[in-house]
Amino acid sequence: MGGGKWEGLIFGTGTGEPDVVTLLMLRMSGLGGLYTELALPADYVEAIKNAVAAPDFKTKQKWAWEVQKLMVDKYCNQIMLCSNMGNAVLRPYVKDSGWFEFIHNGSWTPEDAWLER
């Protein structure tokens, strides 16, 4: 991190960032991110750029999933060892908030939330 040299593993924690693309850009892109020494193959960086520039949610989701597939399955830049779970309580009239339905997968869409009258 910060331009220094390292070998081996880095412990990383979750974040409150609801947009996985922002998280990937800030931490895992090499484009001014925290982890500057990562192996950053061209297809991986291109997928992040496509996710950031996506004109709509479906396109953003497609590219966010592609980035994560490349990161974990192809290049093994990150290995998920655990997943944090949490609790949420919502009033019955809060609909389609997506809150705690999906965690850290780029599917949270707060703009779809609405209140039943």
Image (cartoon, helix red, strand yellow):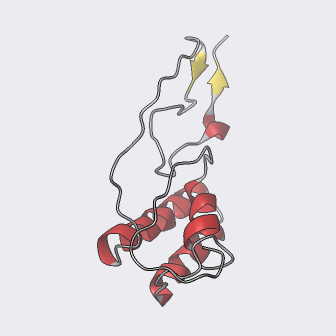
**Residue 59 vertical position relative to residue 77 in the rendered view, above or below:** above
Q: Of all residues shown, which one is farthest toward the bottom?
A: 42
**Residue 43 vertical position relative to residue 117 in the rendered view, above or below:** below
Q: Is residue 96 left or right of residue 70?
A: right
Camera-side residue of 1 and 57: 1
Q: Residue at x 46, y 42 (%)?
A: 103
- Specify whether residue 19 is in view: yes
Camera-side residue of 109 and 56: 109
Quadrant showing the N terminus = bottom right
**Residue 97 vertical position relative to residue 28 in the rendered view, above or below:** above
Residue 2 at x, y percent in the picture: 66, 75
Q: Is residue 23 left or right of residue 65?
A: right
Residue 112 at x, y percent in the picture: 62, 36
Q: Residue at x 42, y 39 (%)?
A: 84
Residue 29 at x, y percent in the picture: 57, 75
Q: Residue at x 46, y 29 (%)?
A: 86
Quadrant showing the C terminus = top right
Q: Residue at x 55, y 70 (%)?
A: 28
Residue 93 at x, y percent in the picture: 60, 13
- Specify whether residue 54 is in view: no
**Residue 55 vertical position relative to residue 93 in the rendered view, above or below:** below
